[in-house]
Image (cartoon, grey):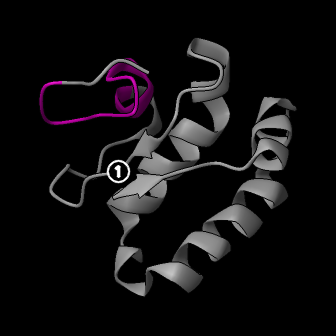
Amino acid sequence: MRVYPTPSARVAARQLGTTAAADEAWGEVLALSPDADTPGMRAQFVCHWHFAEFAQPGKTSWNLEPWRPVVDDAEMIASRCNPGGPEEPF
């Protein structure tokens, strides 16, 4: 699944402590794609929300894959939001 963040989402993602905004944005993703409602997909989205705009500002899409394993936060960050397989750089 490719998530194309809006300009306002990119601004919100750059702000620290935006858990409520991340939850709201994830709700918008689920409204468009309810089948994405899995723990691994949400974790990938939240990781991208918190780090993608810092690592590679303006990346066209945030790519989420349902086959990726559910991992703890430390492994999610270490894998650059892409646990369990080859990564695509931010």
Q: Residue at x 85, y 47 (%)?
A: 8
Q: Quadrant of the C terminus?
A: top left
Give the number of marks. 1
**Crowd class of label 1 (few under 14; some 14 to 19; many from 20; radius 10 Å):** many
- Image position of 77 with respect to 35: above or below: above
User: Which type of secondary structure does the marked residue at label 1 adopt?
Assistant: loop
Return the x and y of residue 62 as percentages of the image width and height.
46, 42
In depth, the one of 61 and 30 nearer the eye is 61
Return the x and y of residue 44 as percentages of the image width and height.
43, 47
Amino acid bearing label 1: Leu
Horizontal relation, residue 13 to residue 73: left or right: right
Could you say which quadrant of the image residue 85 lies in?
Answer: top left
User: Dominant secondary structure of the magenta stretch?
Assistant: loop
Residue 79 lies within the magenta run: yes
Q: Residue at x 35, y 50 (%)?
A: 64
- Image position of 43 with respect to 58: above or below: below
Return the x and y of residue 79 as percentages of the image width and height.
31, 23
Please give the range of residues in magenta.
75-86
Q: Residue at x 31, y 44 (%)?
A: 71
Horizontal relation, residue 7 to residue 36: left or right: right
Could you say which quadrant of the image residue 88 lies in?
Answer: top left
Residue 87 lies within the magenta run: no
Residue tagged by mark 1?
A: 64
In depth, the one of 24 and 33 nearer the eye is 33
- Image position of 54 with respect to 20: above or below: above
Q: Residue at x 50, y 50 (%)?
A: 45
Return the x and y of residue 31 as percentages of the image width and height.
58, 84
